[in-house]
Image: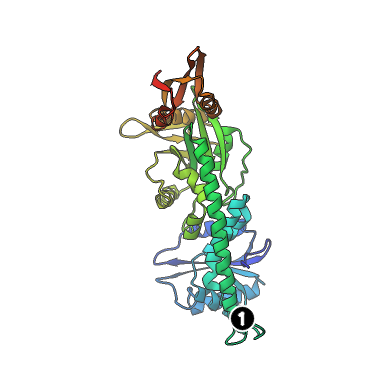
């Protein structure tokens, strides 16, 4: 259904600079996208225009150049590093005789390859269906044929195109209902987990900044790490003990990228929810990237889209070994640590990062003395399961616990009959 490039397909890459000079880094990133999808670039065509051409996007002269290059290189597919309208995509396909995939379609394909969980696969399929909904008309004759007028089908009939659209719409509804059910189940599970919560961290950043490498270095988890775009897609959550014994939950999330398709931002709530509901975001940045400031802005733009822009951030400048720099901590105007320079791959500066996390969370976590009645055994078990118990004493009246909890969660325990909370 979705015309993805097959592994090993020969691809012609097309990128235009619109309204300004070309940036080689943009072309390099697009090449990495093509390689991540399994394509084999055999030719690259670049150019510059003040504005897109309405018929071919690239203009008639450039479109003819693409056709000739694709024929000479015996290409299977043409990949365009821009969102194309359905008509532009069809016109390029008709002229070149090759399949054409725009930037959004290419990123959707990579997501389809990376999704591992059931929910992730459903979200990718839903995003793909929405993407191709307006691309059903390909000029193929079978789309215009009328269905036969058999029993119950006599009259004007229904074109194949109308059938395809109707079936696509039905599938979108089915996927929407399934995802809503999964969302409800996830929220139920999250509510159970946060009944006695512990602080949470979410790793965010531009794709290939080293988030998964840092996740593995912090937690010891053998997370999948590869030098490719979108290596991590489905969220991975693990527990981490900070200096002083404070327990936190760390979540690795999908990497962001320039011009991330809106339908993907909307679809991948399972990953992005971890960022939206974290106590602190670890914004991982490739310190060696000359365009790191642009990438920081792009990540912050997506965070604003998902409603996570108000969550406190610690900027983590990774890969300092490439710059031959030493680990260090930077402070904001108020003297609070807000940036740490590390090398996750070399294990440099991880102690500074953990200390910084603990310091930033200290204002969100308080050490309290909690007295529970003997009848509150279930609540006590949840506290231990969450790893927030520092110490405990038993008495005839009940349990006397010392716990580390965020202030906002005290109300959960205060509502528990017979519970008493005071400063430790």
Answer left or right for 149 relative to 237: right
Q: Point out the residue furthest to the top here.
A: 396
Mark 1 lies on a secondary structure that is loop
129 lies above or below 354: below
Q: Position of residue 22 (x, y in %)?
A: 45, 63
Of 316 and 107, the residue lying toward us: 107
321 lies above or below 98: above
Q: Position of residue 180 (x, y in %)?
A: 53, 54
Answer left or right for 301 relative to 240: left
378 lies above or below 207: above
Residue 347 makes an appearance in the image: no
Report the residue at 66% width, 83% height from top: 151
Q: Point out the residue furthest to the left here.
A: 333
Tell me the quarter of the image containing the C terminus.
top left
Q: Point out the residue furthest to the right here.
A: 8
Report the residue at 58% width, 65% height from top: 171
Of 134 and 55, the residue lying toward us: 134
Q: How many marks?
A: 1
Tell me the quarter of the image containing the N terminus.
bottom right
Residue receiving disc 1: 140
Answer left or right for 306 relative to 128: left
């Amino acid at each position: 259904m979705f015309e993805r490039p097959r592994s090993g397909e020969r691809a012609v890459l097309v990128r235009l600079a619109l309204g300004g000079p070309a940036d080689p880094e943009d072309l390099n990133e697009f090449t990495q996208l093509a390689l991540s999808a399994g394509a084999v670039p055999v030719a690259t065509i670049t150019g510059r225009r003040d504005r897109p051409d309405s018929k071919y996007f690239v203009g008639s002269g450039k479109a003819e150049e693409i056709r000739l290059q694709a024929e000479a290189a015996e290409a299977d597919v043409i990949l365009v590093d821009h969102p194309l309208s359905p008509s532009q995509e069809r016109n390029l396909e008709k002229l070149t005789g090759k399949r054409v995939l725009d930037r959004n379609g290419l990123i959707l394909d990579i997501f389809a390859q990376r999704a591992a969980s059931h929910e992730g696969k459903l979200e990718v399929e839903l995003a793909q269906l929405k993407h191709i909904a307006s691309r059903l008309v390909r000029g193929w004759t079978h789309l215009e044929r009328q269905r036969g007028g058999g029993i119950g089908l006599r009259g004007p009939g229904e074109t194949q195109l109308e059938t395809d659209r109707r079936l696509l719409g039905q599938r979108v509804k089915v996927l929407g209902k399934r995802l809503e059910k999964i969302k409800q189940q996830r929220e139920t599970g999250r509510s159970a987990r946060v009944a006695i919560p512990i602080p949470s961290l979410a790793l965010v950043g531009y794709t290939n900044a080293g988030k998964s490498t840092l996740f593995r270095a912090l937690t010891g988890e053998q997370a999948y790490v590869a030098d490719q775009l979108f290596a991590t897609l489905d969220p991975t959550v693990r527990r981490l003990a900070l200096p002083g014994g404070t327990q936190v939950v760390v979540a690795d999330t999908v990497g962001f990228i320039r011009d991330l398709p809106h339908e993907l931002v909307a679809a991948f709530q399972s990953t992005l929810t971890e960022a939206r509901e974290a106590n602190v975001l670890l914004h991982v940045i490739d310190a060696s990237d000359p365009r790191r400031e642009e990438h920081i802005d792009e990540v912050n733009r997506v965070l604003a889209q998902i409603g996570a822009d108000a969550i406190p951030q610690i900027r983590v400048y990774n890969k300092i070994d490439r710059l031959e720099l030493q680990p260090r901590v930077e402070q904001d105007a108020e003297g609070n640590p807000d940036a740490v320079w590390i090398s996750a791959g070399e294990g440099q500066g991880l102690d500074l990062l953990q200390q910084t996390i603990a310091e930033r969370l200290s204002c969100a976590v308080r050490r309290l003395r909690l007295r529970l009645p003997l009848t509150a055994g279930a609540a006590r078990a949840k506290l231990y399961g969450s790893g927030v118990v520092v110490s405990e004493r038993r008495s005839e009246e009940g349990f006397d616990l010392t716990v580390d909890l965020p202030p906002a969660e005290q109300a959960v325990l205060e509502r528990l009959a017979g519970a008493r909370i005071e400063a430790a």
